[in-house]
Each structure stands twice: as C-alpha cells, then as structure tokens.
Image: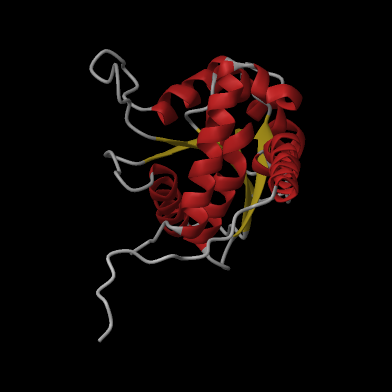
Amino acid sequence: MKKFKITNIKERRRLTWFGKMLLLVVFLILALIYIFNIHSFLAKTKPINGDILVVEGFIPDYAIEGSKAIFEKGGYKLLVVTGKPYEKGYHLSSYKNSGKSSAATLIKLGLDAKYIRVVSITDYHKRDRTYATAISLKQWISGSGLNIKSFDLVTTDCHARRSRYLFQKAFGDKIEVGIIAIANNEYDPNKWWKSSRGFRTVIQETIAWWYARFLFSTN
C-alpha cells in the first residue's frame, strides 16, 4: 500500500547569471531602439498634395500658423478645420468648439475666409473623438458636392500616425489621406525623454497608437 504524500519534490529551471545578463542586454537594446526611434515613428509626415488641407482644430496657435503657411504654399482648394466642443470654458467662449476658434485664428492671421470651412463633432464621444471627427468630415465631403479624391491632414507631432490611421480607416479606399506633422515646440523631439511634457506626450501617444491599431473597433 502506497503512503499518502503531503508534498512533492519538483525540479525547477532557473536562469544562470549569464542568462540573466543576456536577458538584461536584450531588454536594454530594445529600450534604446524604442527611445531613439519612437518619436519619428509616431510623428509621421507623408503629404500627398491632396485636393484640400484638413487641420485638426485642437492644435496650438503656432501649429495653426504653420497650417496657414502649408495651405498657401500647397495649392489646396480649401482649408477644412475640424473641431470638438470645449471640455472646459464652453459657456465662456463665443466659439464653443476648437474648430471655430482655430478658423477665427486663421482669419485673424490673414487667410481669406472664403477658403475656410469648419467641420465639428457636436457632442463628446467616449470611444474615440479622432475617429468620430473623421466620420463627420466624411459626411461633410459627401454632402459638399466637391470632387475630393485625397486630402492632407495636419496635426501635431506624435499624434500624426494615429490620426492618419483613424482617418484612413474612416474613409476606406475611396479617399487617400496624407499626413503632415507639425513639430511640438514645447520639447526637443530628439531628446523627448528629458522633459516632462515630451515624456508624457510620447508615452501616452504610444499607448493610444497601439490601442487604435489593435483594440479599437468601429462597431
């Protein structure tokens, strides 16, 4: 008759010191690859000389100024500013959303109002406001009567790859989307990890990109 056992002896494999060092080296190499390449990956710029220029209205004033210069040099038919309602100060502002505010800024900078259109989402979208904005733009283009086959999208640096991906996802293969990333002047993109603003921006946009690419669903 076999005896009842309370414990068992099991063999367990452990990393040797060499294995641990090798694992550490691999981790450091991957970390360095990420640090020195992630910003340029996220801040994608690939304009296609589209029919119109689309500007994300939330971008700061210096980027709005840059958008004006891009429009004037690019030979675009129109400049369309997207926008969303203000989350703070809505009741204090006469513009109510970022698109109208940015359009007014462009006019103040000297751009003729006849070239400007504003397309805004009307409420807060809990899933993804960038995608919701793209859908609003798609609906506007469909009802505008304009023959638009492509457009260039302007946004700020690390937001670029995600914005372009979500806009292209919304438009499918009917309209081609180019992207122009205006550099963030609050930190050095080559040393983003040395500033609080740069670190937060890159890490947040890295997470947001992976979410948009692999988890976000339009259903």
Q: Nearer the viewer, residue 163 or 102?
A: 163
From the viewer's perspective, is 122 left or right of 39? left
Image quarter hosting the N terminus:
bottom left
Do we see residue 185 in this rendering?
A: no
Q: Position of residue 80 (x, y in %)?
A: 52, 39
From the viewer's perspective, is 71 left or right of 146? right
Q: Position of residue 54 (x, y in %)?
A: 57, 41
Q: Nearer the viewer, residue 8 or 218?
A: 8
Q: Position of residue 142 (x, y in %)?
A: 44, 59
Image quarter hosting the C terminus:
bottom left
Looking at the rendering, which quadrant does residue 97 occupy? Answer: top left
- At x 29%, y 70%, the residue is 5
- At x 73%, y 51%, the residue is 48
- At x 62%, y 60%, the residue is 149
Do we see residue 201 in this rendering?
A: yes
Looking at the rendering, which quadrant does residue 189 occupy? Answer: top right
From the viewer's perspective, is 95 left or right of 48? left
